[in-house]
Image (cartoon, rainbow, N blue to C red):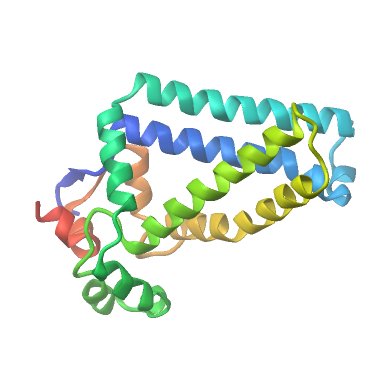
Amino acid sequence: MSAGVERFTVSERALHWALALGYLLLLASGLPLMMPALQGGIRGYSLLIGERLHIACAIFWVLTMIATLALGDRRRVKRTLEELARLEPSDRRWLRSFPRWLVAGPRERARLDRDVGRFNAGQKVNALFTLVTASLLLATGVALWPFGIDGIVRDVHRWLTLLVLIPIAGHVYLAAVHPSTRHALKGMLDGRVDREWAASHHPRWEAK
């Protein structure tokens, strides 16, 4: 391994984990409410307890993110969000090659990543998807509680919950299992990644 290079600051990592952990807690507390079959495996479970736990997780999620933004380096976070929102022609080429990228060998993957900056197109699309779906889940959740609006709102909330399961599973797989990308998790844990890995997967960013 070569010398490390800083990829994420404390503020960026804190916001990521506040979002991710809160999201997982919401899923864990919300799925039994959606799927009654899961309730039988939870000792002492009741709908009242489940609903209160889910609401508590939602409040924790929102307050944690607000506190992270309030106490952290907002300028750096803003710059990162701007980078994630900036789609370039090279990103469209990367997305077209994504199925091949998943199974490519190191040399071919490095060729496909040759125009990648700090974030590849998959990370940008995932960030946009997460922002949109999280906002809609929060909005529909607020409509359900405390305003008590039901009907189609509850159906939208449920379908959104099911919709996010696949990309979350894909994100966890790429971050913790896939041999080419799991090193990226180190950058989200201690802020640094190996320079050779960065040069191979994010050459435009590493070269700056």
Q: Nearer the viewer, residue 58 or 10?
A: 58
Q: Is residue 127 above or below residue 69?
A: below
Residue furthest toward the left?
208
Q: Specify the quadrant of the image occupied by residue 39.
A: top right
Residue 127: x, y in percent? Answer: 43, 51
Query: Which quarter of the image is occupied by the N terminus?
Result: bottom left
51 horizontally vs 9: left or right: right
> Which residue is painted at 30% across and 36% down in the image?
78
- Regarding residue 45, the answer to whether it shows in the image is no
Residue 16: x, y in percent? Answer: 43, 38
Q: Nearer the viewer, residue 1 or 13?
A: 13
How many numbered markers are drawn? 0
Q: Nearer the viewer, residue 180 or 169?
A: 169
Q: Is residue 129 above or below residue 153?
A: below
Q: Specify the quadrant of the image occupied by residue 25.
A: top right
- Regarding residue 98, the answer to whether it shows in the image is yes
Q: Is residue 189 above or below residue 128?
A: above
Residue 66: x, y in percent? Answer: 47, 24
147 horizontally vs 77: left or right: right
> Which residue is painted at 80% across and 44% down in the image?
32
> Which residue is painted at 33% across and 51% down in the image?
84
Residue 73: x, y in percent? Answer: 28, 26
> Which residue is painted at 25% across and 70% down in the image?
89
